[in-house]
Amino acid sequence: MDLRFSVHARDGTTHARAGILHTAHGDIETPAFMAVATQATVKALTPEDLESVGMQLLIANTYHLALRPGAEVVAELGGLHPFMNWKHALMTDSGGFQVFSLGAAIRDGVGKIADIFPEEDAGEQRSEEAEGKSESPNHPITQSPKGIPLCKIDDDGVTFKSHLDGSIIRLDPERSIQIQHQLGADFILAFDECTSPLDSYEYTRTALARTHRWAERCLAQHAKTRRDYQSLFGIVQGGAYRDLREESARVIGGLPFAGLAIGGSLGKSKSEMHAILDWTIPLLPDEKPRHLLGIGELPDIVEGVARGIDLFDCAAPTRWARNGGLIVSRAIAENPEQRLNIKNSRFAADRAPIDPTCDCYTCQNFSRAYLHHLHRAKELLYYRLASLHNLRFMARFMRDVRAAIIEGKFSELYGATRTTKLSV
Amino acid sequence: MDLRFSVHARDGTTHARAGILHTAHGDIETPAFMAVATQATVKALTPEDLESVGMQLLIANTYHLALRPGAEVVAELGGLHPFMNWKHALMTDSGGFQVFSLGAAIRDGVGKIADIFPEEDAGEQRSEEAEGKSESPNHPITQSPKGIPLCKIDDDGVTFKSHLDGSIIRLDPERSIQIQHQLGADFILAFDECTSPLDSYEYTRTALARTHRWAERCLAQHAKTRRDYQSLFGIVQGGAYRDLREESARVIGGLPFAGLAIGGSLGKSKSEMHAILDWTIPLLPDEKPRHLLGIGELPDIVEGVARGIDLFDCAAPTRWARNGGLIVSRAIAENPEQRLNIKNSRFAADRAPIDPTCDCYTCQNFSRAYLHHLHRAKELLYYRLASLHNLRFMARFMRDVRAAIIEGKFSELYGATRTTKLSV
């Protein structure tokens, strides 16, 4: 079954577009934001919670799931959909980003896995690290991983140590795709080499050539072992180097992928990220869906949509929630990031909901005072109520962006966003 | 408004009875088990979750809530019901147990609050300590707190240090009742002195006399500042000393309390606990509801019901859940405690629900394999799914006990329970 993606409306002055992505597990209205379910769960939320906030698609993590519980276990239980009881669409990443970013973290850090992932602070911290803890718009790789003993790249694949038990693991394009077939998500991603903003032009070029060779191997493997409903997305790399990004867009865009993701280092600033999108997207085939990997700040999403992005994923909205950062309407926001900090003592007796304009379960039922109390007391319920709110905000935001495109009002919304200090 | 309690059925051979306790926030079918909402939340669960599992009543913690967020904040927001958005009945304890058990913990430990409640492990650990972490059937006080600098008792009340910030706090019968009036639960408890199984007869007698004088002060304060719908329960103390328990039952049972709780040290063994109930309950007025404080093992509940107990509270079912102990039917249980340990690797690929006979959300939607994975990965969703299951089990268990009493089959159920090794 080929992936069906139809574009229903286009903005007149930008590249923004509204479409529908058809999957075996339901339709996805684009532009869409997908929540991150690293370990086959969006932290603290049930499938019903995610349905209730309007999430149409989740992204789970091949690296984490391959290590625990293992792709074989998930396959034995019928794949990720029944395993986590999620009836809607799923994506998995290829594991490449985690392997390289963990490798980089290890090299940049003290060199011992135990120091980076202390035993006491297991799942949560590991996922945070792997999902990209920094608030920067791109993945937090600051060094290329070449020559790192704990993560060794060759032209054929990558050898690394499990952060859970130190066992030696080999991942290559074929294995990554096979694992993703076992996991059974609707959308799977090619196994690529992520480079960092600090990598030289030469290193980035070498890595890119490898990523392009791996892309063809991923496609070949995909043809062999995929479940009928699965679609493979290619990933455009090339760092912040214009010619490399353009070359990658042409190469990856020219291969028979079902969709195209833009990944790796998106530069050192918002303007570099925008430039990378401006170089890349016009060279990609218009009929395929485009996914900007790891981006989730509201102004960044609008900038991406304006340049023709259809899909976004980011762990930040749920991570902000757990850390006290609740997304609110611009009118009541404390800062350009549109978040208020529920830890602030001014909320201690505040009977208002987080955002009076929000229709989420949390805002309909609980006061800021109660959330402030739960957060201070480190109560488990806090994480759930806060995550629900932030994801509902993201879903409503994407719905508004989509409606604006369809109603010919996207430029208006885009202009309003650009007046904040966040955008260039 | 006086508390209305009606007994509808009595077992022919034991003292078991089935009744209805009418409150301004709904009726409670007894015998009933109430979940513990220490910090104005049952850990990881929403009010809707608690409704869905059939919880009719929760007990919150005066000591914890007085320290954080403070009784004034809760009162300003309309009381605990609107604060935590719980529409059904609530109870608060008096704070006495926490003050004395923290005092005892401090004296038995290294003498520094910081060592007992490390900053990093705030709310959860504190609550666990205060709620009674041991698996023993009674409160985990092992020493009387007399003479402890961090918790000083005089005939008028108690002076202690806050475990949160070390500030000096004074609690006496009047203040405890006032705080409970501010919190606004339907049932509130008298401020008493908890003694331990290690206390001498002389000390226990002295403490009991104080508790009895405090009981009258609690009643006097209750008459002055209560909300119309609030009812005050007295607490029978006296340790494991028969004459003191009998004296306390006569004194407390003779005062105009709306209900009667049995608290403090319930002895060093199950048989001592049963003896204490056998001495006490026949001396209590039959028309008032009886609450056995801090008991939650299934066989102990049946033993309590057989002796005429109507209400139970215990933090253990939700604590077991968080630690991997899931309550199951006797037919599939691994041990007389009727729990299976989801951490066991034999569940890693087990597609069955926790308990195939259970109708809870968790069992209807997720496999043991998924729960095993979530627990290993320390995922927040685990705590919620496990807590939901255990509380649903408790609610179903109490419903079955009640039905057995009404249908004249309680002796049968009681006999089946007594054949387990847990009971004497």
Image (cartoon, coloured by chain):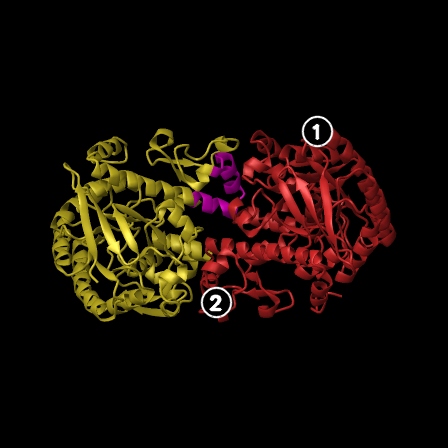
Chain colours: A yellow, B red
> Does any portion of residue A150 appear in the rendered image?
no
> Does any portion of residue A136 appear in the rendered image?
yes
Q: Nearer the viewer, residue A302 or B46?
A: B46
Q: Residue furthest front?
A: B407
Mark 1 and mark 2: span between their CA atoms? 53 Å
Q: What residue is pinned by disc 1?
A: B225
The answer to whether residue A187 is left or right of residue B148 is left
- Extent of the magenta region: A365-387
Main secondary structure found in the magenta portion: helix
Q: Which mark is residue B45?
A: none
Q: Nearer the viewer, residue A234 or B18?
A: B18
Residue B369 locus on image (x, y percent):
45, 65
Amino acid of disc 1: Thr
> Was residue A374 drawn as part of the magenta stretch in this picture?
yes
Sequence-first disc among 1 and 2: 1
Q: Residue at x 25, y 69 (%)?
A: A174
Q: Which mark is residue B352?
A: 2
Residue A241 locus on image (x, y percent):
16, 50
Residue B415 to residue B78: above or below: below
Disc 1 element? helix
The answer to whether residue A243 is left or right of residue A319 is left
Q: Quadrant of the C terminus of chain A?
A: top left
Residue B71 to residue B385: above or below: above
Q: Chain of mark 1?
A: B
Q: Are marks 1 and 2 in contact (CB under 8 Å)?
A: no
Disc 2 element? loop
Q: Residue at x 45, y 57 (%)?
A: A122
